[in-house]
Amino acid sequence: MNPQANLIFIISLLLGTTITISSNHWIMAWTGLEINTLAILPLISKSHHPRAIEAATKYFLTQAAASALVLFSSMTNAWYTGQWDITQLTHPTSSLILTSAIAMKLGLVPFHFWFPEVLQGSPLTTGLLLSTMMKLPPITLLYMTSPSLNPTLLTTLAILSTALGGWMGLNQTQIRKILAFSSISHLGWMAVIIIYNPKLTLINFYLYAMMTATIFLTLNTIKVLKLSTLMTSWTKIPSLNAMLLLTLLSLAGLPPLTGFLPKWLIIQELTKQDMAPAATLISLLSLLSLFFYLRLAYCTTITLPPHTTNHMKQWRTNKPTSITIAILTTMSVMLLPISPMILTIV
């Protein structure tokens, strides 16, 4: 793709995100979401492969339907209350429609079917944008409207997302699809707590975005798209593969690593809100996704494929790993000891 065109699309993405997260009026928020959708479409379909075109089409149709629902929800609310302010979404029907629209934009169950397909058809760098930056505006809208949302509905969506995100990722061999189901599972954790403590949702999102960015950038460096090629990639940059193992375990939420922090805080908050059964259920369901993270981790560093002579070994590269990946991997693994400081900042 032409570098100038690429720059314009990236700037449009930043602009759309900024407009949505800084707006008070529903029409401005909707405008930002539309700019975002239109800017990411050329980045999804830039390879001109039929699968990429299919992914872009699916993404466009889903996001257009979700944007229409956002408009419908805000107009219904304005009709009944006379308010166009985002924080004044008080009508129950409007908040129900908005929850469905945001769930569709984020890829929460039962509106999740588009997300693995779109991520599988996109390049790794675009997949990174879809998994992190494109989730920020919808989560911001949920954050701003959180006092008037329906707790039962959101808890149900969250538990279903964690269950299906873990269950459907078990049988995958394509890494982008595994990361898509991982994203759906993490969104479940964010949705379950947004009504009770919206700040925790943001902490969870920031840490999730950081760990996912690390994984996507690492996979992009070692040029790996499926499990079979991941098995032989350890010879390229062994140190980076070792850090990828730790980042995957961190994303799974294992204790001494960064990823344990949001899960720990969310379980603690749910228990405070007398939701111990929900906390127990969501913790048990996250064991499903732990299985495929362990599978990825195993393929990354621990296993050597059988009959190694039949495999084309990769040359070890002398190309230095970028400083961005070095910083992100360190943060993805070692932030747990400074969790009190993170809590005071956010």
Image: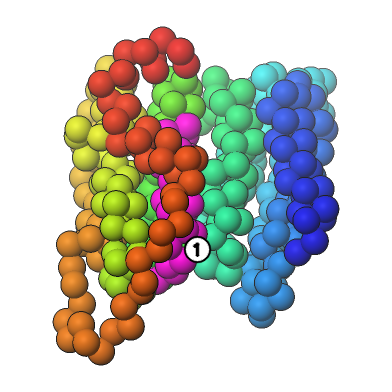
The answer to whether one can see residue 105 in this image is: yes
* Horizontal arrangement in the rendering, residue 44 relative to residue 194 (left or right): right
| Image: magenta residue range | 205-227
The residue under the point 81% across, 48% down is 8
- Provide residue 56's location: percent of width, then percent of height: 69, 65
Give the image quarter of residue 190: top left
Q: Is residue 216 magenta?
A: yes
The answer to whether one can see residue 153 in this image is: no
Hey, which residue is sitting farthest top in the picture?
A: 344
* Horizontal arrangement in the rendering, residue 120 relative to residue 144 (left or right): left
- Which one is in front, 208 or 330? 330
Most frequent secondary structure within the magenta stretch? helix
* Horizontal arrangement in the rendering, residue 55 relative to residue 11 (left or right): left
Hey, which residue is sitting farthest front in the picture?
A: 318
Which type of secondary structure does the marked residue at label 1 adopt?
A: helix
The residue under the point 27% across, 17% down is 272
- Provide residue 274's location: percent of width, then percent of height: 27, 21
- Please give the residue where the numbered disc 1 appears in the rendered image: 116
Q: Looking at the picture, which amino acid does disc 1 mark? A: Pro
Q: Quadrant of the N terminus?
A: bottom right
Where 260 sits versus 41, above or below? above
- Which one is in front, 213 or 307? 307
Give the image quarter of residue 145: top right
* Horizontal arrangement in the rendering, residue 214 relative to residue 92 (left or right): left
Q: Is residue 251 magenta?
A: no
The residue under the point 30% across, 72% down is 232
